[in-house]
Image (cartoon, grey):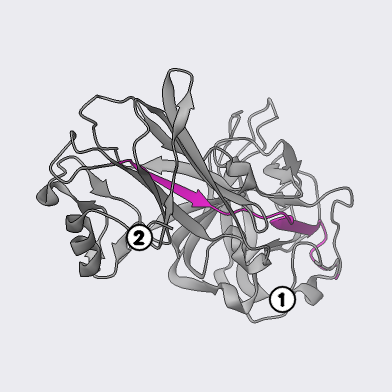
Amino acid sequence: MVRSLPLLFLLFLSAGAVQAQQTRVVPWNLEKTDGNRGSAYPFGYTAGRTQQVVDGAALCSRTAVLMGLALRRDGRGANTYKARVVPSLKLSLGHTKVTPSTMSAAFASNRTGTMTVVYPAASFHLPPLPPSNPGTFSVKWAWKVPFIYTRSKGNLLLEWEIPGPPGKSEYFMDAHGSRSMGGRASHYGTGGVFAGKDAYSVTCPSPSLLYPGGTLSLAASGLKKAYTAVAIVGTSRTAFGSVSLPFDLGPLGAPGNFLYARPTFLFSLPLSQAGGSFGGSLSLPLPSDSWFAGAKFFGQVFFADKASNALGLVFSGGVEMNLGLQAPPVQLLGNYDAKKPTGYMDGSRPTGLVIQFTGVFN
């Protein structure tokens, strides 16, 4: 760990406040990709019962204030799905101790907590859905009273109930069969400029290893010199104590530079020559505990270069890293007869609807 920093930056560190609604797709790696499976539940029949368990780690780190959700059509079909009215549909949400791997074929056994009806039994309009791959999240529900999902209370259970005589209907929702949900990494902010105009980048080179028991990595490349480099790994991109992030380092002597990640941990990042430029990487083992899934980390690298500004530091843009799951994130259970106490699951692999949730996720 690095303990020596320029004086002005040390002084800054020692100083160390209603969120907008967001959308989150589960599984997140299918946000812009078709799940390549179709589900006859809940709308491939004219009636029935559908349950889906969502591992809480796929949804949030601690809590989620849910205000709506949406489904999309199966992207593989070539026909336009015709609009129709479902005479009666009820949608309920609740906490459950069941996991995607332990979900029961008996609907009642999966309800281990109180269910909250977010869409009371009423008619529901299914829109026409033309061919699209991936489809758009056009089959929507929204409610005024938020459902507060708390991860410590268990996983999330969704249940659709459509009474009536069973019949077939070509209206298949996008689904996927997956045994895991890999981690993901994305970039935010802009990096500072070197006096030498280095065309550098800072990335997470192995997002597929972002899971409990895996590895968190940061890499810098494209640098003109073997600068002294320090990697920041933090747990927030919005605040560092009472200081809001991003924090403008211009007043400290580094115009165009920002602190994007809370400096929870600082690590030396040695650089070496590779071809015509310099670079280096850092790999950190992640705890294997399953509760760690769904956690977020934020990374950034700063480089010592007296020629670039008065502070003598150049800060990269930020890297957001989301930990995935090695276990299946969802499981679906359905029956075309709403009166039956049991349903059907895909026995060959965990299968679930691709769902876009709307709310605030913490």
> Which of the two discs, 1 and 2, sits closer to the camera?
2
Vertical comparison of 297 with 98: above or below: above
Tell whether position 326 is magenta: yes
**67 relative position to 156: left or right:** left
Instruction: Determine the residue positioned at 35% across, 42% down.
Output: 228
Residue 293 percent across, percent down from the top left: 61, 61
In this view, the residue in front, 273 or 14, is 273
Q: Amino acid at mark 1?
A: Lys
Instruction: Determine the residue positioned at 72% across, 44% down.
Output: 176
Of all residues, the one furthest to the top in this rendering is 276
Vertical comparison of 8 with 195: above or below: below
Q: Specify few, some or many for label 2: CA neighbours under 10 Å numbering under 14, 14-19, or 20 or more.
A: few
User: On the image, numbered disc 1 is attached to which residue?
Assistant: 97
Q: Quadrant of residue 57?
A: bottom right
Vertical comparison of 188 with 101: above or below: above
Instruction: Determine the residue positioned at 86% across, 66% down.
Output: 105
User: On the image, numbered disc 2 is attached to which residue?
Assistant: 3
Q: Specify few, some or many for label 1: CA neighbours under 10 Å numbering under 14, 14-19, or 20 or more.
A: some
Is residue 75 in sight in this rendering?
yes
Q: Quadrant of residue 47?
A: bottom right
Magenta span = 315-341
Q: Amino acid at mark 2?
A: Arg
